[in-house]
Amino acid sequence: MAVLYLAMGFYTTMQADGMTSLISENNGMLPTYRPDREFAENLPPGINFNAESEYRTRYFIVFINDDAELNSVNLEHIAAVSGEEAFEMAQKALAKESETGYIGHYRFLVTDSMVIFLDCSDSNTTRNMVLVIFVLAALAIMTVVTIIFMALSKKTVEPFEENSRRQKQFITDASHELKTPLAIISANAEVLQYKSGENEWTKNIVEQTKRMSKLIGDLMKLSKTE
């Protein structure tokens, strides 16, 4: 996206520089279009110039006299700039000490006899609009992809969640089922110890039932924490 934006900016600047050079070469005027090979060959490289260019191109010129002072202005091809604004912009262009550059949305070219300003607002607006459209499209695509991913992920995870739930339920049910017989075995062993006295076998039964009860309790705690 950034590459496209920069490429469009480079193309806009290239076209603007071609037009200002053409105006400079024709003494401050755009030439009348001719559909012949000679005319095309005399155009600056890469410039998009056609029969409508002379009428739709907005530009103005501030002339420089022999003493390197701003002399007069030509506003015939633009309505958005006053003479005072044109002189101020020309002074800023000369202060930049650069032959070409931007002042606002105007591309300028400084020559020995004039400062040419070309209005690039339409191109800049188009470029910004393309950027906005690409950003919105990218956000829309990301949103759709995220929704699809979440939906697919949920369906993918559902079997594992169900399996985990069943495992927990099985452990809980089994623990409850084992507690009752273990309690009965432990109680019977204690009765035998009471009646016949403690011996090696009854002692082992009681110890193992207590051990099993503890393991069952640990399993139930584990199933609740996962």
Image: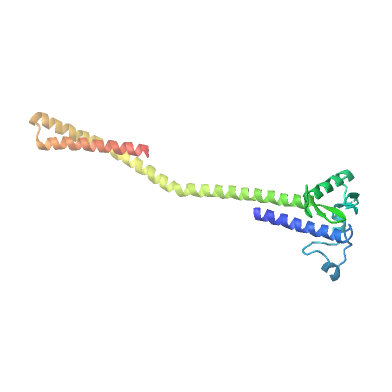
**Which residue is at 86% across, 46% downward?**
87
Image location (x, y in percent) of residue 28 = 89, 57
Res 18 quadrant in image? bottom right
Coloration mode: rainbow
Quarter that holds the C terminus:
top left
Residue 51: percent from left, percent from top: 86, 61
Q: Quadrant of residue 185?
A: top left
Quarter location, residue 197: top left
Task: Where is residue 108? Give x, y as percent.
Answer: 81, 53
Q: Residue at x 65, y 49 (%)?
A: 135
Is residue 149 visible to us here? yes
Residue 52 can be seen in this image = no
All told, the count of numbered labels is: 0
- Residue most toward the left? 196
Q: Residue at x 17, y 36 (%)?
A: 207
Residue toward you, 89 or 193: 89
Q: Looking at the image, which is closer to me, 95 or 137?
A: 95
Q: Left or right: where does residue 109 sit relative to residue 3?
A: right
Q: Is residue 58 left or right of residue 157?
A: right
Tell whether 36 sits left or right of 207.
Answer: right
Q: Position of residue 48 (x, y in %)?
A: 79, 61
* Residue at the image position 85 percent from the left and 70 percent from the top: 38
